[in-house]
Amino acid sequence: MAKSTRPAKADKKAAAKSAKTASVEVVEEAQGMGFVEAATIVTALVMIAAIVLVDHELGALGQGVFF
């Protein structure tokens, strides 16, 4: 016997029910920069400043990359 390729009635009802109940609520994000983003930027700037200052001090010894 050949297997039917059409979905059963129960499958159709379940699909119709899930399609009716599926709804998506769109929520907008808050505007502006949060604490985590600000802390990330400040940390990056401080790290860059530290690398430049250490390289400047190494430049006095003739071992710096930039100085």
Image (cartoon, rainbow, N blue to C red):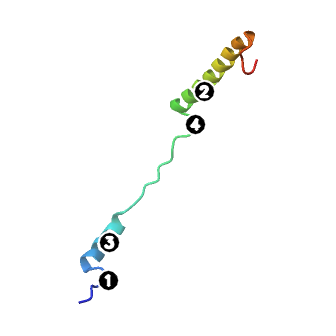
Front residue of 21 and 5: 5
The residue tagged 3 is 15
Give the distance between the C-alpha atoms of the residues marked 4 and 2, in whole angstroms. Answer: 19 Å
| Residue picked out by circle 1 | 5
Q: CA distance from mark 4 to mark 3?
A: 41 Å
Task: Name which of mark 3 and mark 1 comes first in the sequence.
Answer: 1
Quick one: SS at disc 4?
loop
- Check contact, mark 2 vs mark 3: CB within 8 A: no
Camera-near label (3 vs 1) is 1
Mark closer to the chain start, 2 or 3: 3
Is residue 24 left or right of 8 when viewed as pictured?
A: right
Q: Which residue is mark 4?
A: 32
- Marks 4 and 1, the one that precedes in the sequence: 1
Looking at the image, is 13 positioned above or below residue 53? below
Identity of the amino acid at label 1? Thr
Q: Within 10 Å of the Cα at label 2, are there few (<14), some (14-19), or many (20+) other Cα atoms?
A: few
Distance between mark 2 and mark 1 Cα atoms: 59 Å
- Whether tag 4 and tag 2 are in contact, CB under 8 A, the answer is no
> Which structural element holds mark 3?
helix
Give the x, y percent position of residue 16. 33, 73
Residue at 75% across, 21% down:
66
Residue 20, located in which quarter of the rendered image? bottom left
Q: Amino acid at mark 3?
A: Ala
Three-letter code for the amino acid on which mark 4 is drawn: Gly
Task: Name the residue beneath numbered marker 2.
Answer: 44
Closer to the camera, 48 or 59?
59
Q: Are there few (<14), some (14-19), or many (20+) residues within 10 Å of tag 3?
A: few
Q: Where does residue 67 sit, x and y in percent of width and height? A: 76, 17
